[in-house]
Image (cartoon, coloured by chain):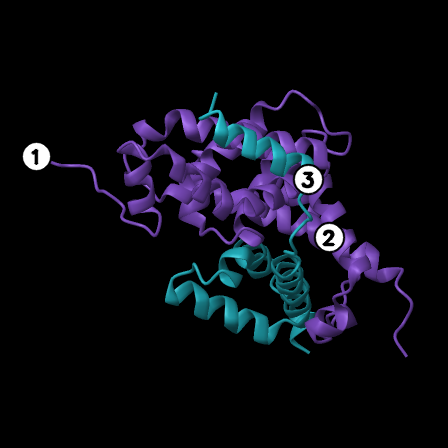
Chain colours: A cyan, B purple
Amino acid sequence: MSQHRHDHHNCMALFEKMSEYIDRELSAEDRAQVEAHIRACCQCQACYETLQRTVDLCRSSTQDYPMPDTLTAKLRALIEAGGH
Amino acid sequence: MKGKTTVRDEDFELVQAINSGRTELFSKLVEKYQQKLYNFGMRMCGEPRDAEDLVQETFLTVYRYLSGFRYETKFKNWMYRVATTTCIKAKRKPKHAPDYELSLEDYLPGEGEDLPDQAPGWAQRPLDQLLNEELARRIEQAVLELPKKYRMVAVLRDQEGFSTEETAQILDISVANTKVRLHRARLFLREKLKGYFDHEPTPA
């Protein structure tokens, strides 16, 4: 029911802080406020979950790219030339 | 008298040795960081040729200026600073990276807009059920579509694993600015992922 009495101001404030909340960069007081709001507002909860999942997916997509042989050769040449 | 702090990181001794004349040890630094820098180059540029140039330019600059490196930061962070500067200066304009500002308002739900009361399935399913080659390519593409200044922050923070303070230092911007760019970049990426999952076949 709480979403029908949605205090838009709180949602805006939360929206701006959401990344800091995800990164655990908020003060204990701000963090508690965000948590209380998320518990009470299912729309902000949904917004938080999709952003958190976006961050999780980016952090998990860190596979190595195969290095081209040409680069390995260039770096070897750089080392042999002593950076010249 | 206030002296500058010396950061003793895992590369300290190796860098000291190179700077005291054992230049042949530079190959150890190259071996250690070439893959990481190439990954960074691919995430930033999306093209093997450009990523290759970025790695080569970065090592060349590091080699030239290593003797002036004073260990006021970790070697790795200094090297990434060189890499990001190289990237900013790159003449080639990637086709998918127009420079424009991302505004927070663009991602705010509009007044009266019908917002979902529940997070969609992709935000709730276990990560390992979601991740596959196609999604990895989609994320890669979405990152490349970010304007460069936002892409740098997103890549350094969420893919290279630097902290907010380190990212700010590497890019020579304030912590507050780093946070603003990161948040907007994540909101941009979330929209792209939403778009992707909205068209994904419903799992059985």
Residue pointed to by mark 1? B1
Q: Label 2 lies in what chain?
A: B
Q: Amino acid at mark 2?
A: Ile
Where B39 falls versus B97 (above or below)? below
Residue pointed to by mark 2? B139
Real-space Cα separation, disc 2 to disc 3, in angstroms = 26 Å
Q: Amino acid at mark 3?
A: Asp
On whether disc 1 and disc 3 are found on a single subunit, the reply is no
Q: Secondary structure at mark 2?
A: helix
Q: Residue at x 71, y 69 (%)?
A: B123
In the picture, measured across the screen, residue B16 lies left or right of residue A67, that is: left
Q: Secondary structure at mark 1?
A: loop
Q: Nearer the viewer, mark 2 or mark 3?
A: 3
Q: Which image quadrant is residue A69 in?
A: top right
Q: Decide which of B159, B174 is in the foreground and name it.
A: B159
Q: Amino acid at mark 1?
A: Met
Q: Label 3 lies in what chain?
A: A
In the picture, measured across the screen, residue A34 lies left or right of residue B16, that is: right
Q: Label 1 lies in what chain?
A: B
Real-space Cα separation, disc 1 to disc 3, in angstroms = 51 Å
Residue pointed to by mark 3? A69
Q: Of callouts 2 and 1, which one flags the residue occurring earlier in the amino acid sequence?
A: 1
Q: How many marks?
A: 3
Point out residue B21 in the picture as x, y percentages from the top left corner: 29, 31
Real-space Cα separation, disc 2 to disc 1, in angstroms = 49 Å
Q: Residue at x 74, y 71 (%)?
A: B117
Q: Secondary structure at mark 3?
A: helix
